[in-house]
Image (cartoon, helix red, strand yellow):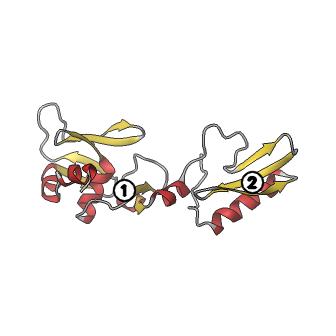
Amino acid sequence: MNGAGRRRQMMNLEEIVDVFDYRPDTGQLFWKNPGKGRQMERSIGSLCKGYLNVQFGGRNRRVHHIVWLICYGEWPLGQIDHIDGNRTNNRIANLRIVNNQDNHKNMKRFSTNTSGCTGVSWSKSKRKWCAYINVGKMIMIGRYGSFDEAVEARKKAEVQHNFHQNHGRN
């Protein structure tokens, strides 16, 4: 068993339900019996890389992993995707298990994007709009005379390669 598996086993469902109260309607996690310095009425979690984390069992734990364990009784086998892209929205209806490739099919648009559409860029040398898609390897979809044509081609490729409808959002 790898190190991550051993660390995950340190927390079991019984420990979690004794310590945490999860509210599925809001996606918030609360301490059941707050100790010194902990407030019962405030949801818990501090931001780290956009995700809510909580200190428990001597380790920093992701809240969405705890939520998954509470709701399904087992650790997630794979990555947990926040469907709406909001890493702090831990409503169980917003969480799904995906592999790495599928998780990348639900990414927001990069902040460095200047065209306004993921996978579409202007080629100065060709003086055309280029559409491309990354599905484990970069695929050039084509070059187009108008931005709208390139966007349409990119959207068709997203459907063809089973990208999530939220992919490329702001």
Left or right: 35 as drawn, with respect to 71: left
- Residue 118 position, x and y percent, is 66, 49
Label 2 crowding class (10 Å Cα cut-off): few <14, some 14-19, many 20+? many
Left or right: 20 as drawn, with respect to 135: left
Amino acid type for the residue under numbered disc 1: Arg
- 168, 34: nearer the viewer: 168
- Residue 27 position, x and y percent, is 33, 53
Outermost residue on the front side: it is 1
Tag 1's secondary structure?
loop
Q: Which mark is residue 131?
A: 2
- Residue 106 position, x and y percent, is 53, 56
Q: Quadrant of residue 155?
A: bottom right
| x 34%, y 53%: residue | 26
Left or right: 15 as drawn, with respect to 55: left
- 74, 22: nearer the viewer: 74
Label 1 crowding class (10 Å Cα cut-off): few <14, some 14-19, many 20+? some
Answer above or below: position of 62 versus 142: above
Label located before the other in sequence (2 or 1)? 1
Q: Which residue is mark 1?
A: 91
- 134, 25: nearer the viewer: 134
Amino acid type for the residue under numbered disc 2: Ala
Proximity of marks 2 and 1: CB atoms separated by less than 8 Å? no
Tag 2's secondary structure?
strand
Outermost residue on the bottom side: it is 160
Q: Where does the C terminus fall, quadrant-wise?
A: top right
| x 71%, y 58%: residue | 154
